[in-house]
Image (cartoon, grey):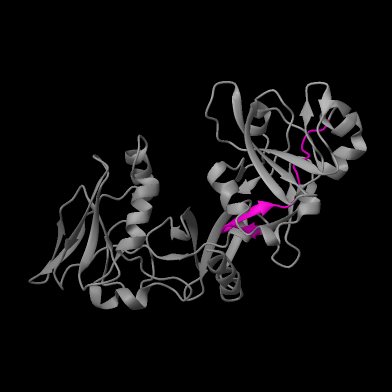
Amino acid sequence: MLDEVWRSLCAVAILTVSVVTHNYAVEFKDFRDGRVYRGIPSGSLNWFKQSLKYSKTSYFTDENGIPFYRSDSWKASCPEGTQLPDETDWDELIEDKFSGPDKMQNMSDFAGNSSRGFYKFEMDEVVNARKGFVYFAVRGPANHVIRLETKRGTTKYVDIEDADAVQIRCVFPRDQFAEKNISPKDMIFTDKRDNKKYKVGVRGGKIWMMKNLAFSVTSAKQCYVEDKSFCEKFGRYYTYEDALKACPPGWHLPDDGEWRDFQKDRATLDWDNLGQGGCQDWDNFCDGFNSGHYWSKSSIQENTARSWEFNRSDKDIDRTDVSVYKGLYVRCVAD
């Protein structure tokens, strides 16, 4: 997974000519005709929010200006840097966006105002077939498409004939560093809430803050031995309830699974960074120069949550259940 992240970084050099980010929104510019497509992030991909409108490869454009494409032009239709999604890509989108209680609304938003079915061309006549459904091209076997029924939130793969034409959605790799406004050159994230800066890195295939969160320090009691200079050095203590909502938009408190992935390669851990700052235990403090204690989102027992303790002198890690009222540190991980 880590290799995939860095491969995505390498791909940025190709995509920077056509991908622009604005406050976490991604857009792709098709330089063939100048059209700009908003991206919908899902898994490792961004999906065009609008159907492709490249007229040179389309076979028919309906009265609403939506182009439809025959299968012999599908491969050449998506702009360079994007591609036609295959079944695996569609399955991941369906699992992410078109399942659960909001599936019909999400599918309707994805399809837009169109339930135009697909178009058949017979004896010089244009026939709108299966109105009430939306059909999109699928990379793979010829004439293989996916059908979305927005009124029921259902999907089905079907085959059409050579003379039939459907809509196209293109996909391109996500650059999660760009989405979080992180420059790959300096690997610094700026929390827009207070303009504090955090070094970030990739561990376990995810982007982590490599410093403890220090958002909203208003009292010395939030700091080690009630000294605000230690909040600058170690970060702020949070109760479990505060920790759950402390990370900036687009980031979250890691759960046990993410912490396990984070610490798998212990030889590469920054023990001097992780293993300091202690914790706040009522009116007392844990060893602030040999241990650092961090909240996990995971909670098993009532009024307790998981704590991960990193001990730099022993290079040891201890996972325990502690009171939700203790003060521990927060490391945020990107969504």
Up-down relation of residue 75 to residue 41 (above or below): below
Frontmost residue, 260 versus 231: 260
**Rendered position, 274 above or below 85:** above
Q: Quadrant of residue 291?
A: top right
Above or below — where is 3 with respect to 96?
below
Regarding residue 329, the answer to whether it shows in the image is: yes
Residue sitting at 60 percent across and 63 percent down? 20
> Which image quadrant for residue 187?
bottom right
Where is residue 46 drawn, in percent x and y?
47, 59
Q: Is residue 226 left or right of residue 16?
A: right
For the view shown, which residue lies furthest in the front direction?
Answer: 314
Query: Is residue 61 rendered magenta in the image?
Result: no
- The image shows residue 263 at horizontal and vertical percentages of 63, 53
Q: Is residue 101 left or right of residue 246?
A: left
Q: Tell me the magenta residue range.
A: 202-217
The tally of labels here is 0
Asked if residue 133 lies left or right of residue 288, the reply is left
Whether 213 is among the magenta residues is yes
Helix, strand or loop for the magenta stretch, by majority:
loop
Tell me which residue sits at (66%, 52%) in the image: 208
Q: Quick one: which residue is furthest to the left in this view?
A: 123
Whether residue 335 is visible, yes or no, is: no
Which residue is at a point 49% across and 57% down the rendered structure image? 39
Front-most of residues 60 and 132: 132
Q: Nearer the viewer, residue 69 or 311?
A: 311
> At which x and y percent is residue 70?
23, 72
Which of the pair 8/17 is nearer the observer? Answer: 8
x and y percent of residue 139 in the render? 30, 70
